Image (cartoon, rainbow, N blue to C red):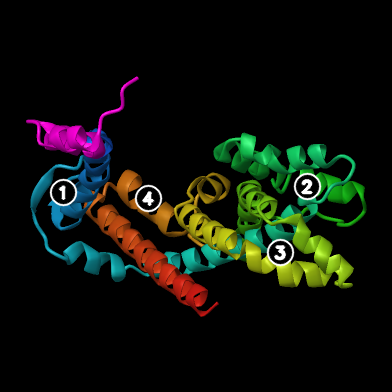
């Protein structure tokens, strides 16, 4: 095979269409993703535009726009005491579920990452709730916590722990606490999966060196596992907060925000405004406020994480 000399190569670069072919060759991947990017942009921005449009217009219960209202619906929402209560309760719900999930998932993932007999079965049991839909899980817990025929009261009575049935879902504090507990349980499988991925990426040589230096299991966890797992903890915190903040099935199916709106959070308040009372504009205003809260949180958290990482 005859190799072209330098003169031939320099001549070929001067041939007509050479620059165009090179441009297409290197830019083709970008051109190929442009249609997908435009479709994704439309899918994201179109509902957002509709949401903002509804929130600043008067609408009937079928969503037909009647006239411009400005920020009137935002003012109406903030003047509603139920919205303010739901706003505070959403903060407690999100922090309770996400905080409890992270605290439980880290040691669970650390245990499941270590070799022991039956580890595969243990991992399957931990991940099993993930295979069940969230509405079905909430429905089962609602049946199990029924004050008269629930399995939990019956089991506690059989064990002699309680002498009379506990009204789990009729007391405001008890009902909200139980819902946070259920929220933690259903969030653990996803979070443990993230942490198992992070733990698998930590080199075992670090633990072997730490054992030679006489480090205890707690010292290995505190000085090796926790620092190297921090990026995965940040991912789990952000994803869980976005997911839990917008979580609807658990509270709606178990108590429908009751008793007396005592377990209502923003997403159930939004649902009632839109689909029970037919206040589409107020519901859109609540959606915009929820979106703004999440955006502010994500930006603040991302800046805080980047600042901490730059210090290290």
Name the residue beneath numbered marker 2: 152
| Residue 194 in view in this figure | yes
Rounded to the nearest whole Å, what is the CA distance between mark 4 and mark 2? Answer: 30 Å
Residue interval drawn in magenta: 1-27
Height in image: 56 above or below 59?
below
Name the residue beneath numbered marker 4: 272
Which label's residue is closer to the chain start, 1 or 3? 1
Rounded to the nearest whole Å, what is the CA distance between mark 4 and mark 1? Answer: 16 Å
Residue at (31% x, 27% y) in the render: 3
Front residue of 152/131: it is 131
Q: Tell me which secondary structure the magenta stretch mostly adopts.
A: helix
Q: Position of residue 210 (x, y in %)?
A: 82, 68
Which label's residue is closer to the chain start, 2 or 1? 1
Q: Position of residue 171 (x, y in %)?
A: 63, 61
Q: Tell me if 252 is positioned left or right of 2 in this view.
A: right
Residue 5 shown in magenta = yes
Which label's residue is closer to the chain start, 4 or 3? 3
Question: Badge 3: few (under 14), some or many (20 or more) residues near its Cα, within 10 Å?
Answer: some
Residue at (19% x, 49% y) in the render: 49
Rounded to the nearest whole Å, what is the CA distance between mark 4 and mark 3? Answer: 45 Å
Front residue of 160/237: it is 237
Residue at (9% x, 31% y) in the render: 15
Disc on res. 59: 1
């Amino acid at each position: 095979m005859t190799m072209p000399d330098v003169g031939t190569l320099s001549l070929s670069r001067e041939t007509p269409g050479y620059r165009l072919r090179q441009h297409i060759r290197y830019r083709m991947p970008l051109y190929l993703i442009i249609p997908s990017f435009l479709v994704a942009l439309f899918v994201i921005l179109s509902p957002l535009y509709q949401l903002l449009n509804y929130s600043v217009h008067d609408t009937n219960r079928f969503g037909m726009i009647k006239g411009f209202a400005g920020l009137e619906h935002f003012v109406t929402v903030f003047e509603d005491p139920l919205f303010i209560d739901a706003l505070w309760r959403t903060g407690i719900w999100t922090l309770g579920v996400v905080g409890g999930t992270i605290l439980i998932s880290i040691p669970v993932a650390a245990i499941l990452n270590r070799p022991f007999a039956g580890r595969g079965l243990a991992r399957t049991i931990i991940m099993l709730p993930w295979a069940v839909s969230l509405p079905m899980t909430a429905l089962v817990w609602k049946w199990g916590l029924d004050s008269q025929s629930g399995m939990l009261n019956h089991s506690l009575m059989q064990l002699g722990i309680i002498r009379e049935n506990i009204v789990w879902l009729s007391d405001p504090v008890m009902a909200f606490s139980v819902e946070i507990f259920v929220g933690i349980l259903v969030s653990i499988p996803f979070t443990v999966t993230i942490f198992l991925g992070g733990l698998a990426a930590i080199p075992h040589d670090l633990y072997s060196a730490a054992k030679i230096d006489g480090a205890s299991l707690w010292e290995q966890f505190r000085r090796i596992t926790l620092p190297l797992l921090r990026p995965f903890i940040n991912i789990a915190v952000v994803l869980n907060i976005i997911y839990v903040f917008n979580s609807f099935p658990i509270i709606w199916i178990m108590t429908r925000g009751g008793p007396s709106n005592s377990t209502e959070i923003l997403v159930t308040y939004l649902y009632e405004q839109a689909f029970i009372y037919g206040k589409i504009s107020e519901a859109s205003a609540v959606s915009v406020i929820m979106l703004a809260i999440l955006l502010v949180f994500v930006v603040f958290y991302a800046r805080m994480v980047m600042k901490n990482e730059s210090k290290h």
